[in-house]
Image: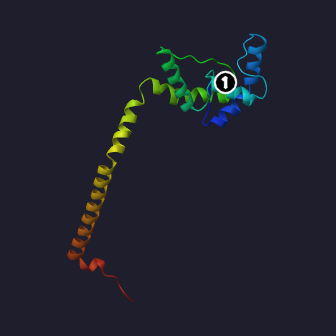
Amino acid sequence: MHIAETRDKARENVKFGLKAWLDYFREVAALPLAPEGPIDDAVDAMIASGLAVIGTPEDAVAQIYRLKEQSGGFGCFLQMAHEWADREATLRSYELFARYVIPEFQGAVEAPRSSRDWAAANRTTFIGAAVQAIMSQIARHAEEQQRQQNINPEATRTTGS
């Protein structure tokens, strides 16, 4: 698994080391994990087969849900440190995984998602109350201005030449 902010960026990142990784598995381990040829073809084949995720955090979430469905559930998910991308891109992939993928499976996104959905469902009530509060304060301010004018009419006069 290698993820980035966009699918294109993830695909670009794995050009760093995926070819060498595939060559090792073809030539040493005798496991043809992807077709020989252009690296983009290998990426497409690995993604299509479900062997790899090279994409976004959303792609990673979707793949783990597919694996969970296929297997009936599992206790943990392990990633291989495969050096498909350079160090910086690999660390960024791990960061994205920790920030956006793991919380999905730890139940950490359920409460914020539920809260967001509730707020969206009640939006018209909130907007109406907010508009009413704003209009009330505008009216209150206008009344205060009027009272001050009535108490001290000199304060509103301007001096002429």
Q: Quadrant of residue 43?
A: top right
Residue farthest along the top direction in this orientation:
29
- What is the count of numbered marks? 1
Classed neighbour count for the residue bearing mark 1: other residues with Cα under 10 Å, few (<14), some (14–19), many (≥20) = some
Q: Which residue is mark 1?
A: 46
Give left or right: position of 4 versus 100: right
Residue farthest along the bottom direction in this orientation:
161
Q: Quadrant of residue 110?
A: top left
The quadrant of the picture occupied by the C terminus is bottom left
Residue at point 46% right, 15% down? 72
Give left or right: position of 47 versus 132: right
Pick the front one: 36 or 125: 36
Q: Amino acid at mark 1?
A: Met
Q: Quadrant of residue 131?
A: bottom left
- x and y, in percent, of residue 135 in the image: 28, 62
> Can the viewer see residue 15 in this picture?
no
Give left or right: position of 137 versus 59: left
The quadrant of the picture occupied by the N terminus is top right
Q: How is the image coloured?
A: rainbow
- x and y, in percent, of residue 120 in the image: 36, 44
Give left or right: position of 19 versus 66: right
> Can the viewer see residue 155 in this picture?
yes
Residue at point 28% right, 53% down? 129
Pick the front one: 29 or 97: 29
Residue at point 61% right, 33% down? 4
Give the vertical position of 8 relative to 62 (above or below).
Answer: below
Pick the front one: 41 or 59: 41
- x and y, in percent, of residue 89 in the image: 66, 30
Mark 1 element type: helix
Give the vertical position of 113 relative to 85 (above or below).
Answer: below
